[in-house]
Amino acid sequence: MDTLAIFGGTPVRDHENAIYYGRQCVEEDDIQAVVDTLRSPYITCGPRVTELEKKLCDMTHAKHGIVVSNGTAALHLACMAIGIKPGDEVIVSSITFAASANCVLYCGGTPVFADIRPDTYNIDLEDVKRKITDKTKAIVAVDFTGQAVELDELKAICKEHNLYLIEDAAHSIGTKYKGQPVGSIADITTFSFHPVKNVTAGEGGACMCNDDELYKKLHLLRSHGITRDINEMVNKSDAGWYNEQVMLGYNYRMTDFQAALLLSQLNKLERFKARKKEIKKRYDEAFSQMPELFLQDSIPESDTAQHLYIIRLNTDKLKCNRREFFDALYAEGTCPQVHYLPVYMHSYYESLGYKKGLCPVAERTYDTIMSIPFYASMTDADVADTIKAVKKVVDFYRI
Ligand SMILES: *Cc1c(COP(=O)(O)O)cnc(C)c1O
């Protein structure tokens, strides 16, 4: 890479040993759990999935849990279960993974993007209020980087305007808000178990809710809208073979061996959370000394299972742009990533008519942020090297 030439000498980490922004932590007992399940009679949607749903309910204090094939499927089913349809508007955080808004489009609804707060990067409640119309049906709020959004305030807004609250908790399994686990607070909370998230099933997701009717819908929608429960049927038959499709659902099931992996991973969530708190503390200590960088503000109500660690460039004190800083860090073998392009700036959303300028804070923030390596299995040496690399790049570009 060119930037290596700028610095000369040896990078902090050579490229065979590069550290990436995130990676899974899969251990021997996780692997054994998968192998054991593959040898069992059920390999899809069997006893492990049922056990996993129970465990997620125990952990989050939610009444119901539906495990699905990925976090995007969970968001899609959440929007379907609350009845999003053409003409409906759903307010969505602007700095998030595209799936947080795509789920609204899948149902024919219209995502309306709300700006973020400049300090925590979570959705800005004042902008949410400004964007409510008589077509608004729901809010999709993201626990960005793992920090719980202002759930009490959001619930109050939803109550006042008769809206559903979907909490996209893809980043935040293990987080508590005012002492209460994320998963039991919003109307529907969705999780993702993609390999970069706090715990993984390879691919996987879940919807958590307390409402019995929403649960029934989510359960039907996960598996084609087909039921074996005579109470849910229209053309009732109690014949042993009879099942009936009562709505248009999907196949969003998770396999039992993925569920086994996640069951094993969930036993480690507290350990992962504690390790990431240690890493975050070391980063905070090192980077708060540097006026060239801004750090994400902590939300005091959130006991956070941190998913990403973001640095933001103070462009008054650095003679480089984000691109140059990013490339230089990359050349040092500590490979960052950017989370995220404001969703409406993707060309597909532009083709739907969304325009730049919609969420100025999100756009300004996007221009100066990056996520540096941050995951539970980082060694102390990995952490030290990441700090060293960031310092080296800051020193090089300091004004
Ligand atoms: C990862 C992610 C999703 C989608 O999850 P998948 O399991 O990858 O489908 C949705 N929202 C956010 C904020 C995410 O980070």
Image (cartoon, rainbow, N blue to C red):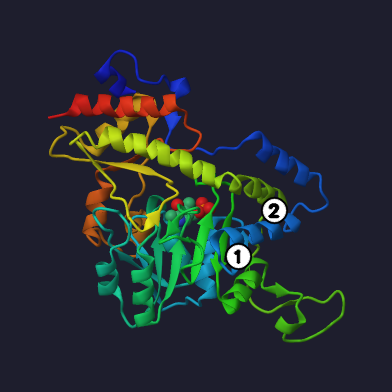
Residue 262 image offset from top left, x and y in percent:
63, 49
Q: Nearer the viewer, residue 240 or 189?
A: 189
Residue annotated with mark 1: 65
Observer able to see residue 171? yes
Q: Residue at the location (38% across, 80% down)? A: 159
- Left or right of 105, for residue 34: right
In the rendered image, which quarter contains the N terminus?
A: top left
Which residue sits furthest front? 179
Badge number at residue 311? none
Q: CA distance from mark 1 to mark 2?
A: 16 Å
Query: Tag 1: Cα neighbours inside 10 Å, few (<14), some, or many (≥20)?
Result: many
From the viewer's perspective, tell me whether residue 343 is left or right of residue 258.
left
* Mark 2 beta carbon near ligand 1 (under 8 Å): no
Please name the amino acid that badge 2 sits on.
Thr
Kind of residue at badge 1: Gly
Place of residue 150 in the rendered image (x, y in percent of width and height, measured from the top left)? 35, 64
**Left or right for 118, reference 95:** left
* Residue at point 20%, 25% (across, down): 395
Crowding near the residue tagged with mark 2, few <14, some 14–19, many ≥20 C-alpha atoms within 10 Å: many
Q: Nearer the viewer, residue 121 or 377?
A: 377
Q: Is residue 60 placed above or below 216 in the rendered structure?
A: above
Q: Which residue is mark 2?
A: 255
Towards the viewer: 247 or 275: 275
Q: Is residue 243 left or right of residue 117?
A: right
Q: Give the vertical position of 364 relative to 242 (above or below).
A: above
The image position of residue 171, as x and y in percent, is: 45, 52
Q: Secondary structure at mark 1?
A: strand
As drawn, 95 above or below 219: above
Residue at 57% over, 60% down: 206
Residue 202 visible in the displayed image: no
User: Along the polypeptide, which appears first: circle 1 or circle 2?
Assistant: 1
Quarter of the figure with the C terminus: top left
